[in-house]
Image (tube, rainbow, N blue to C red):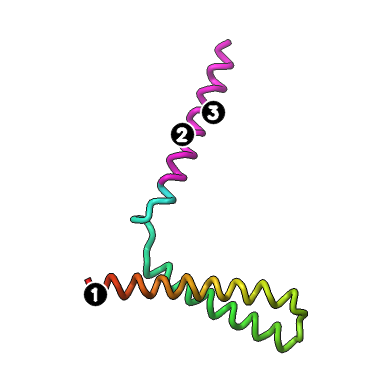
Amino acid sequence: MPEAFAVLAVFTIAGIAYVAAWLQARDPARVDARQDFAQLKIQEAWLRERLERARQEQWSGEMIQPITDELAATLHRLARATEEKTGLAER
């Protein structure tokens, strides 16, 4: 019976550590907006290069479409980040 309590204690501690790490990772105060913005710019440039290469090599539309969709999503996130950055600067 003591072994069962030891196993239960290990699972409980692991569960608490997991939930604490998850909550800490989701804390918006821990996100560096400048670093996030820079990462989005890098991702945008990489996706544009990849899309250009796909067009040069004449990839199929099925292969180009996910790149195009991802680039559109990145541009949308970049626009939102720019608006937030501009809005914060005006305040």
Q: Position of residue 13 (x, y in %)?
A: 48, 30
Pointer 3 or 1: first along the chain: 3
Disc marking residue 68: none
Nearer-the-camera pick, 32 or 71: 71
Q: Is residue 55 left or right of residue 43?
A: right
Residues at marks 3 and 2 touching, judged by CB atoms closer than 8 Å: no
Residues at marks 1 and 2 touching, judged by CB atoms closer than 8 Å: no
Q: Position of residue 83 (x, y in %)?
A: 36, 74
Nearer-the-camera pick, 88 or 2: 88
Q: Position of residue 78 (x, y in %)?
A: 45, 74
Q: Is residue 26 above or below residue 70?
A: above
Quarter residue 4 falls in: top right
> Real-space Cα distance between discs 3 and 1?
49 Å
The magenta span reads 1-23
Secondary structure of residue under mark 1: helix
**Which residue position is annotated with label 2?**
16
- Asked if residue 43 is among those painted magenta in the image, a careful observer would answer no
Disc marking residue 11: 3
Quarter residue 90 falls in: bottom left
Kind of residue sitting beneath label 3: Phe
Secondary structure of residue under mark 2: helix
**Which residue position is annotated with label 1?**
90
The number of callouts visible is 3
> Real-space Cα distance between discs 1 and 2?
41 Å
Pointer 1 or 2: first along the chain: 2
Label 2 crowd bin: few (<14), some (14–19), many (20+), radius 10 Å = few
- Asked if residue 2 is among those painted magenta in the image, a careful observer would answer yes
Pointer 3 or 2: first along the chain: 3
Label 1 crowd bin: few (<14), some (14–19), many (20+), radius 10 Å = few
